[in-house]
Image (cartoon, coloured by chain):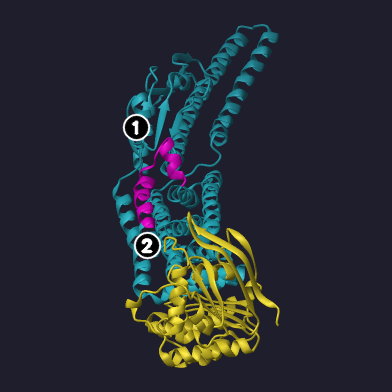
């Protein structure tokens, strides 16, 4: 068993009076791809922001790698719209103070993300999916020890989703620890472990298949017509937690 | 940190240059503002001075045969581009308080009498307001007073020369307002010469005749010596005199005023609005969170915005200054000081823009808030406020920036004003940038 890259204990966070995280414990190990699942407003983004150091917890402790060793892919295609793909990659490579020629790093990264044809296209002219791929490419710059991706596949086509998860697996195999939030069970099927966050608490942590057996006693609204056991397990987990102003 | 700030500033400028419409607006806007202000200020006519004559001892000074009127000399200021409004003291001070006049020139009681006796000098009082025009008008009034002194000096020289002539050749002179009839040294020597001849012919006492010879000799030598002193008197009274020839052309004062205000306005507007919009825009694009997560500190992000503001401000100033420099070539000597003032003003405005961004959060609100803040401050800075309203106005950069630019461009001795208004701008820059830095993570 490898040493944990991330250790979070009893994390609590509130936006004004509204509690978002209510004592979250989380461990991420080197070489592990972990999917963070949960309903809207469960606290997934807040937990990720806490882990990358963007916000400080109200209570609890975190142990994470140094900021420069964390790759962060926020929601919303966080790249400069008026800079081209090349300029975005070059700028972030320089800000990261990566060794080597920033121009070369930009070209290599764009190639790996299959963005070569759009190298000189401004971010504003990219489709949502292409911009998201650029967003992920920026997050992957510099071989980080920890990769935190907040819904990175939003708007990305099927082929590139698969390619993206393939890259994440490659990074994990190289020793990186990956935490990725998603609403797609299909994507979650390829990860090593799933953590289900409901109302600011970890409701489940384990294999993705194990979700099917979670919270067996909780009754579901059968009118939804879900018959996939993992989806049914997830919904039972959501329903089992006390509902706090979701 | 500086490397990161420069990288971010370079990125901002690159993005700015890429938006052609904005670049065109940024070029046209300052020229338009400068043109409008210049036209308005040049049409405003000359600055005014209130003239209060409190002297009940008269207005005309009579020195020797010369007569001149103090008020007439004061009105000569109108030939030098200053309008003179004659009024009483209370009204003059009200006009100064309300900014209707740039200064008040007071002739105190007894001035003419003191000048008339030629026994002591007289003192005029010039009060100025805190408007930048006041300093320039005071300078012009010093020129008027110099001309009065010169006229009095000429009159005194003429009068003294007349005394000396009367002492040598005899005649009527006026001293302290009274007329005297003098015999004169030469006529006295002639009289004595004739008396000596008569005495010698009558076989007078040789000892008395010898004493008369000495006295006649003294009178003639004294007459010669006084004749020499006559020219020396004029040379000693005014060793060097300036001959002023008025030339046609635009007033550097007014063009400097226009430039000073245009710079304050354009830099304030551009730096506050652009920095606010740019920083809040980074939040909208979700890039700010990425930057703050270890790529750039909040301080280096804010510093980057200050660098962008400074580059834009210097670029605008260069454009406006070239036009001004053609009208007033002497201004080129002030260029280094002006650049320092521009950078300081841009820092205060950019810091305020950054603070608006972190308080308003999104780009549209930030832009609107920045414009709403700047718009009312512009006319207020032009009018000039007093009391608590002036303190509030001074907490924002436009008014101190206008004062700083006016002092920098045309104050003969600008350092006091530069330190005061520069200190205010530095304070605004430090406080707003520090607050923006502290609150920036709220945007992430």
In the picture, measured across the screen, residue B156 lies left or right of residue B216, that is left
Depth-wise, is mark 2 or mark 1 nearer the camera?
Answer: 2
User: In the image, is residue B281 above or below residue B417?
Assistant: below
Q: Nearer the viewer, residue A29 or A88?
A: A29
Q: Nearer the viewer, residue B305 or A205?
A: A205
Label 1, secondary structure: give it: helix
Is residue B9 at all visible to an observer of this figure? no
In the picture, measured across the screen, residue A8 lies left or right of residue A35, that is right
Q: Nearer the viewer, residue B25 or A143?
A: A143
User: In the image, is residue B98 above or below residue A226?
Assistant: above
Tell me where residue B344 appears, x and y as whole percent: 53, 56
Place residue A97 in its image quadrant: bottom right
Tell me where residue B371 appears, x and y as whole percent: 36, 56
Is residue A208 one of those drawn in magenta? no
Q: Nearer the viewer, residue B81 or A242?
A: A242
Is residue B375 one of those drawn in magenta? yes
What is the chain identity of the residue bearing mark 1?
B
Chain A colour in the picture: yellow
Place residue B383 in its image quadrant: top left
Chain B colour in the picture: cyan
Is residue B18 at all visible to an observer of this figure? yes
**Which residue appears at 47% of the width and 75% of the height?**
A78
Quick one: label 2 or label 1, which is nearer the N terminus? 2
Magenta highlight range = B369-395
Mark 2: give few (<14), some (14-19) or many (20+) Cα within 10 Å. many
The quadrant of the picture occupied by the N terminus of chain A is bottom right
**Which residue appears at 64% of the width and 88% of the height?**
A174
Tell me where residue B116 appears, x and y as whole percent: 45, 20
Label 2, secondary structure: give it: helix
**Which residue appears at 43% of the width and 82% of the height?**
A131
Tell me where residue B187 appears, x and y as whole percent: 52, 18
Q: Which mark is residue B95?
A: 1
């Amino acid at each position: 068993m490898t040493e944990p890259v991330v250790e979070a204990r009893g994390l609590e966070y509130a936006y004004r009076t509204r509690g978002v995280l209510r004592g979250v414990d989380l461990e991420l190990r080197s070489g592990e791809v972990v999917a963070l699942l949960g309903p809207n407003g469960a606290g997934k983004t807040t937990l990720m922001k806490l882990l990358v150091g963007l916000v400080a917890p109200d209570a609890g402790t975190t142990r994470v790698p140094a900021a420069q060793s964390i790759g962060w892919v926020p929601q919303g295609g966080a790249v400069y719209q008026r800079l081209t793909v090349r300029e975005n990659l070059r700028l972030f490579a320089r800000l990261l103070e990566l060794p080597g020629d920033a121009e070369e790093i930009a070209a290599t990264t764009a190639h790996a993300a299959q963005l070569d044809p759009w190298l000189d296209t401004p971010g504003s002219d990219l489709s949502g999916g292409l911009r998201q791929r650029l967003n992920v490419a920026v997050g992957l710059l510099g071989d980080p020890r920890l990769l935190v991706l907040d819904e990175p596949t939003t708007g990305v086509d099927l082929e590139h989703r698969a390619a993206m998860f393939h890259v994440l697996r490659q990074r994990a195999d190289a020793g990186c620890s990956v935490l990725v939030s998603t609403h797609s069970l299909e994507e979650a099927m390829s990860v090593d472990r799933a953590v289900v966050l409901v109302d600011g608490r970890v409701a489940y942590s384990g294999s993705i298949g194990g979700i099917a057996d979670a919270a067996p006693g909780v009754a579901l609204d059968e009118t939804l017509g879900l018959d996939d056991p993992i989806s049914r397990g997830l919904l039972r987990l959501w329903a089992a937690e006390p509902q706090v102003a979701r | 940190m500086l490397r990161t700030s420069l990288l971010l500033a370079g990125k901002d400028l690159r993005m700015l240059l890429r938006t052609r419409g904005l670049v065109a607006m940024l070029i046209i806007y300052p020229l338009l503002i400068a043109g409008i202000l210049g036209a308005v200020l040049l049409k405003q006519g000359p600055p005014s001075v209130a003239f209060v004559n409190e002297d009940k001892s008269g207005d005309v000074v009579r020195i020797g045969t010369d007569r001149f009127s103090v008020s007439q000399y004061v009105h000569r200021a109108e030939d030098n581009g200053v309008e003179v409004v004659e009024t009483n003291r209370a009204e003059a001070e009200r006009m100064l308080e309300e900014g209707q006049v740039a200064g008040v020139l007071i002739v105190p009681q007894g001035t003419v009498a003191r000048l008339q006796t030629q026994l002591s000098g007289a003192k005029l009082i010039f009060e100025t307001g805190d408007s930048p025009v006041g300093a320039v008008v005071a300078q012009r009034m010093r020129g008027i007073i110099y001309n009065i002194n010169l006229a009095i000096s000429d009159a005194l020289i003429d009068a003294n020369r007349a005394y000396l002539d009367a002492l040598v050749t005899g005649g009527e002179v006026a001293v302290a307002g009274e007329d005297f009839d003098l015999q004169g040294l030469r006529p006295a020597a002639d009289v004595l010469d004739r008396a000596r001849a008569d005495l010698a012919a009558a076989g007078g006492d040789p000892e008395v005749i010898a004493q008369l010879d000495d006295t006649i000799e003294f009178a003639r030598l004294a007459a010669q010596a006084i004749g020499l002193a006559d020219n020396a008197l004029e040379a000693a009274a005014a060793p060097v005199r300036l001959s002023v020839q008025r030339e046609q052309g635009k007033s550097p004062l007014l063009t400097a005023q226009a430039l000073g205000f245009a710079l304050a306005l354009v830099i304030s507007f551009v730096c506050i609005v652009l920095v606010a919009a740019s920083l809040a825009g980074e939040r909208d694009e979700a890039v700010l969170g990425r930057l703050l997560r270890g790529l750039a500190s909040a301080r280096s992000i804010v510093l980057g915005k200050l660098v962008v503001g400074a580059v834009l401000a210097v670029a605008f100033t260069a454009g406006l200054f070239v036009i001004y420099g053609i009208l007033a070539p002497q201004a080129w000597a002030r260029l280094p000081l002006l650049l320092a003032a521009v950078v300081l003003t841009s820092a205060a405005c950019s810091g305020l823009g950054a603070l608006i961004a972190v308080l308003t959060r999104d780009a549209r609100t930030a832009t609107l808030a920045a414009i709403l803040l700047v718009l009312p401050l512009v006319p207020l800075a032009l009018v000039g406020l007093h009391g608590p309203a002036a303190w509030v106005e001074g907490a924002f950069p436009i008014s101190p920036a206008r004062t700083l630019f006016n002092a920098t461009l045309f104050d003969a001795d600008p350092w006091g004003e530069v330190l005061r208004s520069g200190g205010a701008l530095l304070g605004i820059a430090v406080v707003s940038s520090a607050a923006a830095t502290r609150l920036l993570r709220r945007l992430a």
